[in-house]
Image (cartoon, helix red, strand yellow):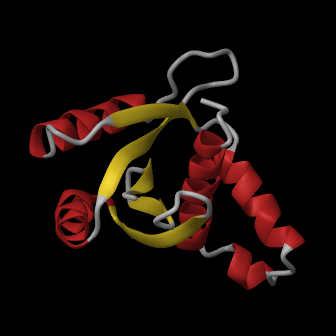
Amino acid sequence: MPRLLAIDYGIKRTGIAITDEMQLIASGLTTIPSETAIAFLADYFSKEKVEKVIVGKPMQMNGQPSESTEIIEKFVVLFQSRFPQMPVVRADERFTSKMAFQTMIDSGLSKKQRQNKALVDEIAATILLQGYMAGNY
């Protein structure tokens, strides 16, 4: 079975998570500089079968688009033009970064380790993917 892939796209960094081939377990894959995301994904898609991509949709608490929405929408348009056959699902990412940070605390990571924003982004992508797999979107 092909995998599912989640993208937590940000201005500077992009967290990426992936499922196993049975689509049972979501795991963080990596965090990359956002400007390299399309090239990274092209390389990844050439090596692995991916069925669908879940991209975070940033929203404010009142349901309105957040300030980073425009940047992410541009990425989605670029992604869809580069990979027109790849289905894209948008998923609310309002709490993923906070949940990622709490996960780091709960895991016993030191304060210095919790300041690793790349790790936060990777965990946020994993939480986004887990939510999608659980049917929350």
Q: Which residue: 37% across, 46% down?
A: 53
90 up-or-down from 29: above or below? above
Which quarter of the picture shows residue 117? bottom right
In the rendered image, residue 74, in percent from the top left (x then y), is placed at 24, 34
In the rendered image, residue 28, in percent from the top left (x then y), is placed at 54, 69
Q: Which residue: 34% across, 49% down?
A: 51
Tell which of 69 and 103 is nearer to you.
Answer: 103
Which quarter of the picture shows residue 52? top left
In the rendered image, residue 26, in percent from the top left (x then y), is placed at 59, 62
Q: Quadrant of the N terminus?
A: bottom left
Q: Which residue: 28% across, 37% down?
A: 76
Asked if residue 91 lies left or right of residue 81, the reply is right
Q: Quadrant of the C terminus?
A: top right
Asked if residue 104 lies left or right of residue 64, the reply is right
Q: How many numbered circles are shown?
A: 0
Which quarter of the picture shows residue 83? top left
In the rendered image, residue 128, in percent from the top left (x then y), is placed at 59, 47
91 up-or-down from 106: above or below? above
Asked if residue 61 lies left or right of residue 52, the reply is right
